[in-house]
Amino acid sequence: MDSHSPKWLSLGPICLGRVHWCRSQEVKPTVPSILTMATDFMSTYANDLLNGRKEAIVKRYDPRGCYRVGQGKKSFETPEDTRMLYGEKWHAPASFTGRTSLTSV
């Protein structure tokens, strides 16, 4: 059978169409929305707070240090300051209710 045979040519579009169909069926990974990521973060954070997981809470902070803001003050804390706060002075709350405007977006 030579390459100019009508049977050979009629199979070409079928094969190409099938390859195209397979390509269009590729599964693309989904990227969670910022709202989903924030909700997940707050959920796991609340769980860490309620269960008194001090080390897990400390690991959430930037290892270079952080600014603590509150009661009209702003101060820089080293990682050691944060570890000392949660290790010695902090106690797990009896309950925790997070409030955020993110969930109302």
Image: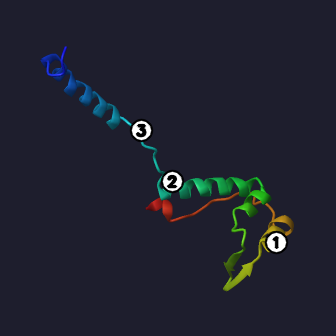
Question: What residue lies at 77% left-to-right and 75% top-to-bottom?
Answer: 78
Mark 3 surroundings: few (<14), some (14-19) or many (≥20) residues within 10 A = few
Tell me the tag on residue 80. 1
User: Which residue is tagged 3?
Assistant: 27
Q: Amino acid at mark 3?
A: Val
Cα distance in 3D space between marks 1 and 2:
31 Å
Quadrant hosting residue 70: bottom right
Mark 1 surroundings: few (<14), some (14-19) or many (≥20) residues within 10 A = few
Looking at the image, do the residues carrying marks 3 and 1 touch, with CB atoms under 8 Å apart? no
Q: Is residue 92 left or right of residue 102?
A: right
Cα distance in 3D space between marks 3 and 1:
45 Å
Q: Secondary structure at mark 2?
A: helix
Q: Amino acid at mark 2?
A: Thr
Query: Toward the viewer: 51 or 84?
Result: 84
Give the vertical position of 82 relative to 55 (above or below). below
User: Which residue is tagged 2?
Assistant: 36
Q: Secondary structure at mark 3?
A: loop
Q: Is residue 99 left or right of residue 8?
A: right
Q: Position of residue 59 (x, y in %)?
A: 73, 61
Disc 3 vs disc 1: which is toward the camera? 3
Query: Toward the viewer: 96 or 90?
Result: 90
Pick the quarter of the image with the C terminus. bottom left
Pick the quarter of the image with the N terminus. top left
* Sequence-earlier tag: 1 or 2: 2
Cα distance in 3D space between marks 3 and 2:
21 Å
Mark 2 surroundings: few (<14), some (14-19) or many (≥20) residues within 10 A = few
Disc 3 vs disc 2: which is toward the camera? 3
Q: Is residue 42 left or right of residue 78?
A: left
